[in-house]
Image (cartoon, rainbow, N blue to C red):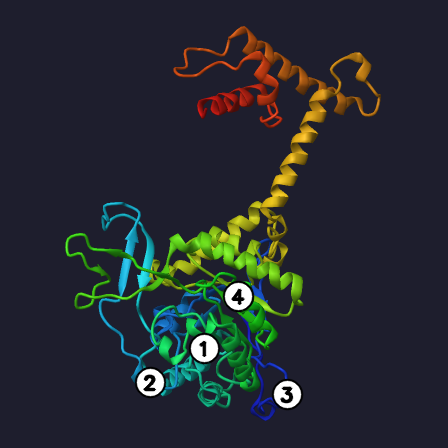
């Protein structure tokens, strides 16, 4: 993929005047030259990314070195580890991770399917992190760098933090960069552990009244796009998502980690991870949370589609390790896909695998761009009541087909090919009926009673309209379950 960066002479590089109520971003243009290759580039809240894969806030974005590595490997964007005004109040402990493996005996060679952490936000001084942000934007002016911020319940503190992370933009030649040195902000309303007494993290995200107030403070001050990161530890995740968007946020991210206790050591009888004999509930991530994340993202996406215009964005998070995992999120309506624990397990080079697998999926379906299939699966979710209605209607339709064209009197002359196919299906079922009556399906299957002739019709109504062989297998299956 070729990269085209806008350049300007020093005389044309004056800082852009900000317009009240508008968001500003780095000036960058990228173009794909791969003929016939699926295009992975996305544009989110005015930000152009070469692919939808973003480093999620956490250890993979904790300092300049690792964020630089992420850009070098090809990640579409990086969200730095969450920062606050006073890093001295952040004190981490060790050990702070615990893992769940696929092997029930916990073999270290088996696959990690669950990962718990009790880690807090960044313990590095804010000024240090800000200097590293500036350095990264000097070196990678066309890459998307997003700051994650969290602060206590204090308007002045939130405003100060936003001012600090949105300090005056830097201009380097021959590149032109206009605006703040962060392209967007993600607000951590969802960390499930640490400092709830200061009304930080999930303590705000779980309280819609607090959330609305704090979002108002943030959007009064912010001049770059703002994403609100949602907690899954709530009954209806659409409520905080709706409030965040109505309060001015340009997007939402979902989900953060799930509150959990990883386990109890059955030898010591102490919880894990164990710190001086004690532990605390922490955040659960990795492959095991993917189905839960899919459900939460689906709920938010449906709400956004029904209640908001197309300008707001959705960034999906949860158990992504393959391109197919990402495709599922995009099919539900996600604009971008964040990966954090997956990077911790598989390394920064994972992005190449993700891109290749996502492109393979797109080729299989002849999709040329992300927009070709974003949200395509969303219309197929409904209520359980509607599922019952749909199945009842389908059964009635199958019954109607089986009832028709059983003799010459049923011919209508409307579409002989279709009517012939219907008749062939009915004859197949009649043959199946004869086989059952004659007892030819016994073939020594232990513990299986043959279907009685008088029960055949009711049983057949439960079998989908398929071939005789498939129907036989399904009937045997039904009988085995009795």
- Look at the picture and state if 326 lies above or below 482: below
Q: Position of residue 138 (x, y in %)?
A: 45, 82
Badge 4 local density, few (<14 within 10 Å), some, or many (20+)?
many
| Separation (CA) of disc 2 from disc 4 | 31 Å
Could you tell me if the residues under marks 3 and 4 are in contact, i.e. CB atoms within 8 Å? no
Q: Secondary structure at mark 3?
A: loop
Q: Earlier in the sequence, mark 2 or mark 4?
A: 4
Between 319 and 152, the residue placed more toward the observer is: 152
Q: Secondary structure at mark 2?
A: loop
| Separation (CA) of disc 2 from disc 1 | 14 Å
- Residue projecting furthest to the top: 438
Could you tell me if the residues under marks 4 and 1 are in contact, i.e. CB atoms within 8 Å? no
Between 318 and 257, the residue placed more toward the observer is: 257
Q: Secondary structure at mark 1?
A: strand
- What residue is disc 4 on? 50
Point 43% across, 84% down: residue: 134
Asked if residue 216 shows in the view, the reply is: yes
- What residue is disc 3 on? 20
| Separation (CA) of disc 1 from disc 3 | 21 Å
Q: Earlier in the sequence, mark 2 or mark 1?
A: 2
- Look at the picture and state if 271 lies above or below 394: below
Q: Earlier in the sequence, mark 4 or mark 1?
A: 4
Q: Position of residue 258 (x, y in %)?
A: 39, 61
């Amino acid at each position: 993929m070729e990269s085209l960066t806008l350049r300007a002479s020093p005389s044309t590089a004056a800082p852009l005047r900000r317009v009240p109520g508008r968001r500003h971003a780095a000036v960058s243009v990228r173009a794909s030259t791969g003929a016939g290759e699926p295009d992975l580039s996305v544009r989110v809240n005015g930000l152009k990314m070469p692919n939808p894969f973003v480093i999620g806030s956490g250890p993979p974005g904790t300092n300049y070195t690792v964020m630089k590595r992420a850009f070098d490997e090809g990640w579409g964007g990086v969200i730095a580890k969450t920062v606050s005004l006073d890093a001295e109040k952040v004190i981490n402990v060790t050990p702070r991770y615990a893992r769940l493996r696929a092997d029930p005996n916990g073999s270290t060679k088996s696959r990690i399917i669950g990962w718990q952490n009790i880690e807090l936000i960044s313990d590095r001084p804010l000024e240090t992190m800000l200097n590293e942000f500036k350095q990264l934007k000097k070196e990678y002016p066309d890459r998307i760098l997003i700051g994650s911020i969290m602060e206590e319940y204090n308007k002045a503190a939130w405003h100060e933090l936003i001012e600090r992370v949105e300090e005056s933009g830097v201009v380097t030649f021959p590149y032109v960069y206009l605006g703040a040195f962060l392209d967007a902000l993600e607000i951590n309303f969802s960390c499930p552990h640490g400092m709830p007494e200061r009304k930080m993290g999930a303590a705000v995200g779980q309280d819609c009244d607090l959330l609305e107030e704090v979002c108002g403070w943030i959007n009064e001050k912010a001049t770059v796009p703002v994403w609100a990161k949602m907690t899954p530890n709530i009954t209806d995740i659409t409520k905080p998502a709706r409030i965040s968007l109505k309060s001015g946020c340009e997007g939402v991210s979902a989900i953060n980690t799930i509150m959990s206790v990883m386990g109890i050591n059955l030898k010591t009888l102490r919880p894990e991870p164990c710190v001086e004999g004690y532990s605390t509930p922490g955040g659960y991530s990795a492959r095991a949370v993917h189905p839960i994340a899919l459900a939460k993202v689906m709920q938010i996406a449906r709400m956004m589609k029904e209640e908001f215009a197309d300008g707001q964005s959705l960034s999906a998070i949860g158990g992504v390790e393959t391109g197919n995992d990402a495709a599922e999120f995009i099919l539900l309506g996600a604009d971008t896909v964040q990966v954090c624990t997956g990077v911790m397990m598989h390394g920064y080079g994972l992005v190449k695998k993700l891109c290749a697998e996502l492109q393979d999926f797109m080729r299989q379906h002849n999709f040329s761009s992300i927009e070709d299939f974003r949200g395509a699966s969303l219309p197929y979710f409904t209520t359980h009541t509607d599922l019952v209605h749909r199945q009842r209607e389908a059964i009635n339709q199958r019954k109607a087909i089986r009832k028709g064209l059983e003799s010459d009197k049923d011919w209508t002359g409307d579409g002989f090919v279709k009517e012939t196919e219907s008749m062939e299906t009915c004859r197949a079922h009649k043959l199946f009926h004869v086989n059952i009556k004659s007892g030819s399906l016994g073939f020594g299957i232990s513990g299986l009673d043959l279907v009685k002739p008088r029960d055949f019709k009711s049983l057949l109504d439960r079998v989908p309209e398929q071939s005789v062989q498939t129907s036989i297998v399904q009937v045997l299956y039904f009988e085995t379950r009795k």
